[in-house]
Amino acid sequence: MISTERTRRGMTAVLSGERRGFLGKLLFVGPAVIASIAYMDPGNYATNIQAGAGYGYMLLWVVLLANLIAMLFQALSARLGIVTGKNLAEMSRDHFPKPVVWTMWAVSEVAAMATDLAEFLGGAIGLALLFDLPLFWGMVVTAIVTYGILIFERKGFRPMELIIGTMVAIIGLCYLIELLIAPVNWSAAATGLVTPNLPDATALTIAVGIIGATVMPHAIYLHSGLTQTRAVIRNDAERRKVLRFSNIEVVVALAIAGMVNMAMVMMAASAFHQGHSEVAEIETAYHTLTPLLGAAAASVFLVSLITSGISSSVVGTMAGQMIMQGFLHFRVPVWLRRLVTMVPAFAVVAIGYNATDALVLSQVVLSIALPVPMIALIIFTSRRDVMGDYASGPLTRILAYVGAAAVLGLNFVLLAQTFGVPIPFLVN
């Protein structure tokens, strides 16, 4: 608790004007860094590998668009917590009818479990490949490590922020190394970043996967909770300062997450697009990287995957705890929460189901659950009786509606394709 209380006192000094300078502003960094893990989880790895292997640098613009949408919704989530002092789940419980609340909770719990399935399996796959372990034992090690990290949550918000921040730095460093090893065509990458292009139905499917998995339900819930009581705010002037710091952090943290995703696509484009465009699975990518770019590149790839899986699994458990407590006003021990969210992953392995296919199915479940927090967030942040003078302005509301419509529309395409519903414009 010492570092948390020291951080809180430091933030109070910055808000009152007693402390100035860059180091003081760094005390406000944390919530968006934790939320940004959702945008670098193992579910993104498979999609980005498919994009780069199949289409080179052509779909980088989709990654950019997805991150811009994510920035808006994470900023709105943080604003809700800062202004109201309540998280999105608590606001939903207080303002919506009970049948709606129960439905939202049930859908959100399923989404939390689907999220953890992808994250938990990702970390386990990485450990299994790196240390030549059976997948089951990779899962056991992942479970032990994630629970060990979750124990630090008892010491307040700051230790967890520092741990997750370190893991974000490791993932970023790994992909910086990958870009130095891989012979990237920077000219083609720049063109792909600013030139919208979907050459065929398969490219559209991959684009839907990238955008549809970007705005994660648990990240929206979690961000509002991470900001709700973090700083002691005594007046409107201080609240505006906290909101300004929060918006800056969201932009920077999600920009870093976006660059990591772009680096994933560029690495896959450089290594696989010419001659290995069929690479679509994490395991295949690892085994193919070794002869193409060397053992170092393959090992760095796995280190980033393991770090991503473990950190995102920790964050997913935190989000699940917050969702249950917010909707039901009920808290369960962390070990029990961790155990419950691990069950689907162990079940997948026990029945011999393909791990990568399970990752894809988890994204479908998330697509179904996504409208719940997105729509609720837009409703609350637009209401003056809830937000007062901090309610979203017309431009923000329009952008939020457009972003939600884009994400939900593309998720509809993803679900339609998954369940074999024909869509006229999806033809090669």
Image (cartoon, rainbow, N blue to C red):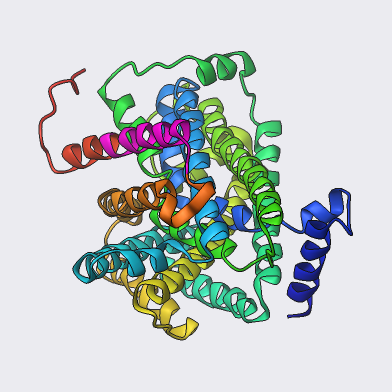
Q: Does 17 sit above or below residue 261? A: below
In this rendering, would 396 be left or right of 427? right
- Residue 44, position in %: x, y? 45, 45
Query: Can see residue 279?
Result: no
65 relative to 76, above or below:
above
Q: In terms of image quadrants, where is residue 402?
A: top left
Task: Magenta stretch: give its range.
Answer: 392-409
Q: Position of residue 20 (x, y in %)?
A: 88, 52
Residue 428 coordinates in the image, percent (x, y): 21, 17
Q: Is residue 192 left or right of residue 323?
A: right
Residue placed most toward the observer, 369 or 184: 369
Residue placed at 60% from the left, 78% from the top?
A: 148
**Quadrant in the picture for residue 59:** top left
Residue 311 position within the rendered picture, expressed as x and y whole percent measured from the top left? 57, 62
Can residue 248 be seen from the camera position used here? yes
Q: Residue at x 56, y 37 (%)?
A: 258
